[in-house]
Image (spheres, helix red, strand yellow):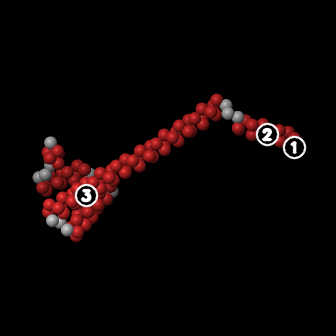
Amino acid sequence: MGRKERRAKERQERKESIRMTPDRIYELKQKTANEAVRRVQEIEKGKEKQRAETALDMLLLFGMTYLHEQKGWGKQRLENYYDGCMNLLKEFEDGKHTIKSLLDKLVEETKINLAEVKE
């Protein structure tokens, strides 16, 4: 195969790689759709995490405000409370606790059942 034939073959291959066939168009649409779905899922996952963090912040804020205003807790006690909550959360995330185990422990030690309090 001479230079002329090799160049003609290379040009033909480039044309074919660029040409938009129905299969290639379908493949590109699928790739684009899959990428869009993946991005939306990442955004939703980020929103979920943001909502969970906001809920946790609110619960801590409400608890700390109550303890400060109604029970007279100062800075040191509130910092200990916050640190204790964060340590417990970390242990929960590490799998050392479950919601059920914490609820059972609370009922066993204090006789407070959050399921009954909700009703």
Q: Residue furthest front?
A: 69
- Which SS class for mark 2? helix
Give the amino acid at mark 2: Arg
Task: Give the CA separation, mark 2 to mark 3.
Answer: 68 Å
- The part of the image, by quadrant, that contains residue 16 is top right
Q: Would residue 92 be visible to someone looking at this image?
A: no
Distance (Cα) linking label 1 and label 3: 77 Å
**Horizontal relation, residue 75 to residue 17: left or right:** left
Nearer the camera: disc 2 or disc 3: 3
Give the number of the disc on residue 53. none
Packing grade of label 3 (10 A; few <14, some 14-19, many >=20) is: few
Depth check, front residue: 75 or 104: 75
Q: Which residue is mark 1?
A: 3
Give, as a three-letter code, the residue at label 3: Leu
Image coordinates of residue 63 in percent, x first then y, are 21, 57
Query: Residue at horizontal 85%, vertical 39%?
Result: 5
Q: Amino acid at mark 1?
A: Arg
**Considering only order in the chain, which callout, 3 or 2, is on the residue closer to the N terminus?**
2
Residue 94 visible, this angle: yes
Q: Quadrant of the C terminus?
A: top left
> Does label 1 or label 3 sit earlier along the sequence?
1
Residue occupying the point 26% across, 51% down: 98
Label 2 belongs to which residue?
Answer: 11
Quarter holding residue 12:
top right
Residue behind mark 3: 61
Q: Secondary structure at mark 3?
A: helix
Q: Alpha carbon of mark 2 to alpha carbon of mark 1: how far?
A: 12 Å
Nearer the observer, 38 or 57:
57
Mark 1: secondary structure: helix
Single out the mark in the foreground, 1 or 3.
Answer: 3
Q: Single out the mark in the foreground, 2 or 1.
A: 2
Relative to 17, say whether 55 is above or below: below
